Image (tube, rainbow, N blue to C red):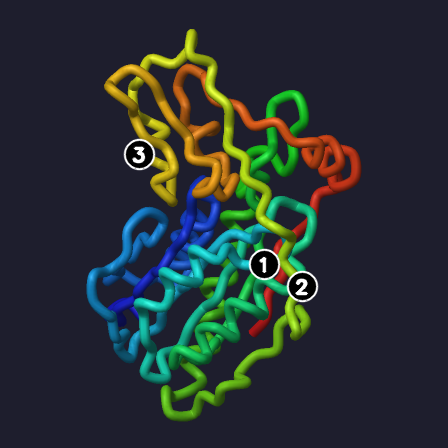
């Protein structure tokens, strides 16, 4: 597959999903790669993907794909384009998210060729209460590369016109898990620590953070999706997010889970 173009479409606020996508691509040994990072921006016009395969990856929030990620994916159309569908979750459960992403892509003209669920550090993880801290780690990355090599084999055995919409069966249910009601909340900020460096503004996927009068950082709770990218990227540790769910995750999901594949 060295001469095949591979497209990567990724929504990855804290970098875990993008990391896994890149490692899978490494395992596929493709040199011609185009990345569409829809974490903060989307194409202004519809994008029709070609014949080469595409990796699509997103994190799992509460057992589902974030709504904003699905909205941004609407900008991409497949023409029976084979897709490697990947989700990352914080060591609890990916529930219906992988199936949801496969279904959405199928509706948009893609044909899922392979799929995988990987573990990435939970958005709510802290030093005091680590939840899948440091993942994806080197073992996860090696697993992702091996998975990419397996995808090459699956790809080589089939021609594009032999794919069917039900190429793979993944875990998950339909109707999907009902999403919980949106509870407006955003990370808090320690004004004494904050240096107004703007790192949080740069990483926020929903543009929920703004600088007011060049003096104060404001976080719009209505726009925040609680990805905690701003918390993890702040060089001064001036941002924090408090939730009782952190303790529950820490106490009940400490046992390491491993990636799952569907080919």
- Tell me the quarter of the picture where residue 247 sits: top right
Disc 3/disc 1 C-alpha distance (Å): 25 Å
Residue 127, relative to residue 24: is it above or below?
above
* Residue 47, percent from left and from top: 24, 70
Residue at the right extreme, as displayed: 252
- SS category of the residue bearing label 1: loop
CB under 8 Å between discs 2 and 1: yes
Residue 230, relative to residue 103: is it above or below?
above
- Between 198 and 219, the residue placed more toward the observer is 219
* Residue 71, percent from left and from top: 40, 62
- Which residue is rendered at x = 42% and y = 72% of the image? 83
Residue 178, relative to residue 127: is it above or below?
below
The residue to which callout 2 is attached is: 177
* Image quarter in which the C terminus is found: bottom right
Residue 211, relative to residue 34: is it above or below?
above
Q: Is residue 79 left or right of residue 168?
A: left
- Which residue is rendered at x = 78% and y = 34% of the image? 251
Number of other residues with Cα within 10 Å of mark 2, as a class: few under 14, some 14 to 19, many 20 or more: some
Label placed on residue 202: 3
The residue to which callout 1 is attached is: 64
**Mark positioned earlier in the residue sequence (2 or 1):** 1
On the question of residue 109 being in view, the answer is yes
CB under 8 Å between discs 2 and 3: no
Label placed on residue 260: none
**Mark positioned earlier in the residue sequence (3 or 1):** 1
- Between 133 and 27, the residue placed more toward the observer is 133
- SS category of the residue bearing label 2: loop
- SS category of the residue bearing label 3: helix
Number of other residues with Cα within 10 Å of mark 3, as a class: few under 14, some 14 to 19, many 20 or more: some
């Amino acid at each position: 597959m060295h001469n095949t173009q591979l497209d990567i479409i990724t929504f990855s606020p804290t970098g875990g999903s993008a990391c896994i996508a890149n490692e899978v691509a490494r395992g596929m040994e493709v040199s011609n790669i185009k990345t569409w990072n829809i974490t903060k921006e989307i194409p202004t016009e519809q994008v029709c993907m070609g014949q080469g395969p595409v990796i699509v990856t997103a994190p799992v929030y509460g057992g589902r794909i974030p709504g904003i990620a699905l909205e941004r994916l609407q900008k991409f159309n497949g023409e029976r384009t084979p897709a490697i569908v990947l989700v990352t979750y914080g060591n609890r459960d990916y529930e219906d998210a992988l199936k949801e992403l496969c279904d959405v892509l199928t509706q948009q003209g893609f044909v899922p060729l392979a799929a995988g669920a990987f573990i990435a550090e939970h958005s709510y993880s802290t030093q005091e209460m680590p939840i899948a801290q440091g993942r994806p780690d080197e073992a996860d990355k090696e697993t992702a590369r091996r998975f990419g090599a397996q995808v090459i084999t699956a790809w080589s055995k089939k021609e594009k016109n032999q794919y069917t919409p039900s190429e793979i069966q993944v875990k998950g249910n339909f109707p999907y898990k009902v999403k919980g009601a949106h509870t407006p909340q955003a990370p808090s900020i320690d004004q004494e620590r904050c240096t107004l460096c703007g790192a949080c503004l740069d990483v926020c996927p929903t543009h929920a953070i703004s600088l007011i009068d060049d003096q104060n950082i404001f976080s719009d709770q209505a726009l925040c999706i609680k990805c905690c990218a701003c918390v993890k990227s702040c060089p001064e540790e001036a941002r924090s997010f408090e939730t009782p769910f952190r303790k529950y995750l820490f106490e009940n999901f400490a046992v390491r889970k491993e990636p799952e594949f569907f080919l």
